Image: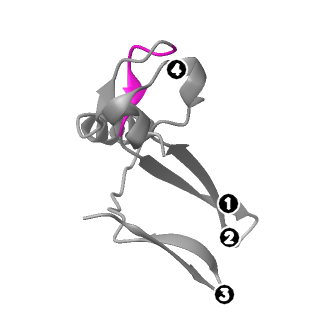
Amino acid sequence: EPLKLRETKKGVFVEGLTKVLCKDAEGALRFMSQGERFRTTAATKLNDVSSRSHAMTELTVTQTIVQDEDESLRTSKLNLVDLAGSERAKRSGATGQRLQEAK
C-alpha cells in the first residue's frame, strides 16, 4: 500500500513510515541493506539499474551534549529520496511499460 505524505505545524512527514532505532552506524547500514531488497529496478539506456519504485530513508541522529552540569539534545535529520524513473524519458530510451513508470 502506498505511503502518504502529510503536513502538520511541525513539518512534513510520511504516514506509516517504518521507524527503527539503531545504536550505531553499522546497525543503520544493516537496516538500509534490508530495505534495498524491496527496490525494483530495470535497465534503460542511461542506467543498468534504474529505479522502478520510489524509496525514502529519513536518518535522524540524536546526540546528547553535556556541558558542565547541563545536558541537552542535538537532533539532525537527513532525507534520502530515490524517485522512480526520474531520468529524462527521451535520453533513457524508455518505451512501453518503462515509459509509463516514468510518468
Residue under label 2 = 72
Q: Characterize the local packing of mark 2: few (<14), some (14-19) or many (20 or more) Cα atoms within 10 angstroms.
A: few
Question: Which amino acid type is marked by label 1?
Answer: Ile
- Taking the magenta stretch, the answer to whether it contains residue 51 is yes
Question: For the residues carrying marks 1 and 3, which lies nearer the camera in this image?
Answer: 3
Question: Do tag 2 and tag 3 residues touch (Cβ < 8 Å)?
Answer: no
Which quadrant of the structure image shows residue 31? top left
In the displayed structure image, the side of residue 75 where residue 23 appears, left or right: left
Q: Which mark is residue 9?
A: 3
Q: CA distance from mark 4 to mark 1?
A: 48 Å
Colour scheme: one colour
Instruction: Count the marks.
Output: 4
- As helix, strand or loop, the secondary structure at mark 3 comes to loop
Question: For the residues carrying marks 2 and 3, which lies nearer the camera in this image?
Answer: 3
Question: For the residues carrying marks 4 and 3, which lies nearer the camera in this image?
Answer: 4
Q: Position of residue 99 (x, y in %)?
A: 42, 34
Q: Which mark is residue 92?
A: 4
Q: CA distance from mark 2 to mark 3?
A: 23 Å
- As helix, strand or loop, the secondary structure at mark 1 comes to strand
Question: Do tag 1 and tag 2 residues touch (Cβ < 8 Å)?
Answer: yes
Residue under label 1 = 65
- As helix, strand or loop, the secondary structure at mark 2 comes to strand
| Image point (76%, 65%), residue name | 68
Q: Which mark is residue 22?
A: none
Per the rendered image, the range of residues in magenta is 46-52
Question: Do tag 4 and tag 1 residues touch (Cβ < 8 Å)?
Answer: no
